Amino acid sequence: MRQKYGYRVRDREALRAAVKSSTRVVPHTVRSLAQAVGISRTTVGDLLTGEQERISEGMAHRLAGALGRPFGDLFVADASESGDEDKPEVET
């Protein structure tokens, strides 16, 4: 069963810029950000490239916090979270 995620990246370029110019003295790398947030490097990389678009609310908050950016600048609630996208369309 596929896990549902409730938030998606609002602006991928803004996320990339936040990684490069975080509030740390030395900007984050994919590895350092993954370690700071407690997720895999693959997940961080996939979010940056667009391979993965949705993440959990908690993960989104941890990423925004690690980058020193307001949550709403980087992530937005995913309207398709209801699960309707998995239901087949039925013609009437």
Image (cartoon, grey):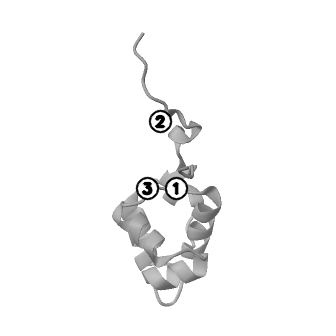
**Can residue 28 be spotted in the picture?**
no
Q: Position of residue 10 (x, y in %)?
A: 45, 53
Q: Which residue is mark 3?
A: 53
Residue that sits furthest to the front in the current view: 1
- Location of mark 2 (residue): 85
Few, some or many residues within 10 Å of mark 1 (<14, 14–19, 20+): many
The residue sitting at 51% across, 90% down in the picture is: 25
- Residue 85 to residue 73: above or below: above
Q: Which residue is located at x 44 percent, y 80 percent?
A: 30
Amino acid under disc 1: Phe
Q: Nearer the viewer, residue 78 or 20?
A: 78
Label 3, secondary structure: give it: loop
Residue 45 marker: none
Specify whether 71 is left or right of 29. Answer: right
**Sequence order check: which comes first, mark 1 or mark 3?**
3
Q: Nearer the viewer, residue 30 or 26?
A: 30
| C-alpha separation, residue under disc 3 versus residue under disc 2 | 15 Å
Q: Amino acid at mark 3?
A: Glu
Q: Residue furthest right?
A: 58
Which residue in the protein does label 1 denote? 75
